[in-house]
Image (cartoon, rainbow, N blue to C red):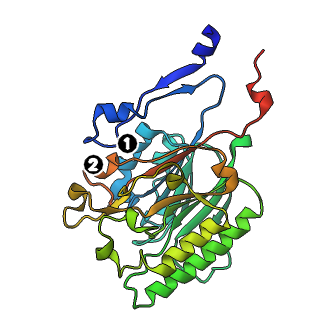
Amino acid sequence: MLRLAQAFRWIPGQARDDSESENAAQDRSQWRCVSCYPAPMKIATWNVNSIKVRLPNVLEWLGEAQPDVLLMQEIKIVDEKFPYLEFEAAGYNVAVHGQRTYNGVAMISKHPLEDVQKGLPANEADEQARYLEAWVDAGDEGVRVASIYLPNGNPVGTEKFPYKLDWMDHLVARGAELLQAEEPVVLAGDYNVIPADEDCYDPPGWEGDALTQPESRQRFRTLQNLGYIEAWRMLHHESNVYTFWDYQGSAWQKDNGVRIDHLLLSPQAADRLAACDIDRRPRGKPKASDHTPIWCELRPPYHPLRYMTG
């Protein structure tokens, strides 16, 4: 019994933000086996809304949350100006698909990044930097990840909405292609899609927005129908939990938000899903992005010999 007890460690619950009570945080406390099982891989996504402005916030969060992989959107900077040194000093490998002033995606990983793909295949005509894909080389725990900044699509009556739908069609095609390899895949980022009314503080107020249009939601569901699992919704049934709050109208203070940042997992990744949550704390910091991180943890693949004891 002593040997078994020593294999576990108490993991205290972490408050989602300053307003959450200590008791509520402790409700999420858990015993975790630390000697029987390797630690899960933590993969996060965050629309940082300018890495130049948000760099101190991002580095602070990395120190606190310790993700193995962070996928970033709206970095708003060209590749050669990206702060590689700061992230490398924090122990991360870096891949960037940048663009001046607008868009731009990046990823950092504690493991090597291989097979880096900039832009969606078969969509070479798209000049906007919105997609970055790579294999996280973590041995048996490796996973393919993509940092996605999907077009907003507003106003609906302009060319921006057809561009959004066409971009989503290319994403669906790439998603289907990746599933053929039968490997763990995480397609994560700012999807600019509110999946359902329960993911929005004011559904009637967003009725005409590109983020709620049937065509946008239908393509998001198509990805799920292919076999991708939405990590947060797989483990949570709450309504009115958000990842984005506008800077205007005291949206953060009133909790007037929407849930538009998602982690979509292939079946092989979903089988390893251990946890998923939204970390509201960065949104309450000075000079905050209007988005906040969402993360998931993937258990290592099960190998019976790995857990045999002598």
Q: Secondary structure at mark 1?
A: helix
Residue 307's tag is: none
Crowding at label 1, few (<14), some or many (≥20) Cα neighbours within 10 Å?
few
Q: Quadrant of the N terminus?
A: top right
Report if the CB atoms under discs 2 and 1 are less than 8 Å apart.
Answer: yes
Residue for badge 2 = 285
Q: Where does residue 161 sit, x and y in percent of width and height? A: 46, 85
Q: Secondary structure at mark 2?
A: loop
Q: Nearer the viewer, mark 2 or mark 1?
A: 2
In the rendered view, would you say 119 is above or below 83? below
Q: Identify which residue, 17 or 62, lies in the foreground.
A: 17
In the rendered view, would you say 197 is above or below 145? below
The type of residue carrying mark 2 is: Lys
- Residue found 53% across the figure and 65% down from its top: 148
Q: Where does residue 43 sit, x and y in percent of width and height? A: 54, 48
Q: Identify which residue, 44 or 302, lies in the foreground.
A: 302
- Residue found 31% across the figure and 31% down from its top: 23
Determine which quarter of the picture holds residue 111.
top right
- Residue found 27% across the figure and 54% down from its top: 287
Residue for badge 1 = 60
Q: Identify which residue, 166 or 52, lies in the foreground.
A: 166
Q: CA distance from mark 2 to mark 1?
A: 11 Å
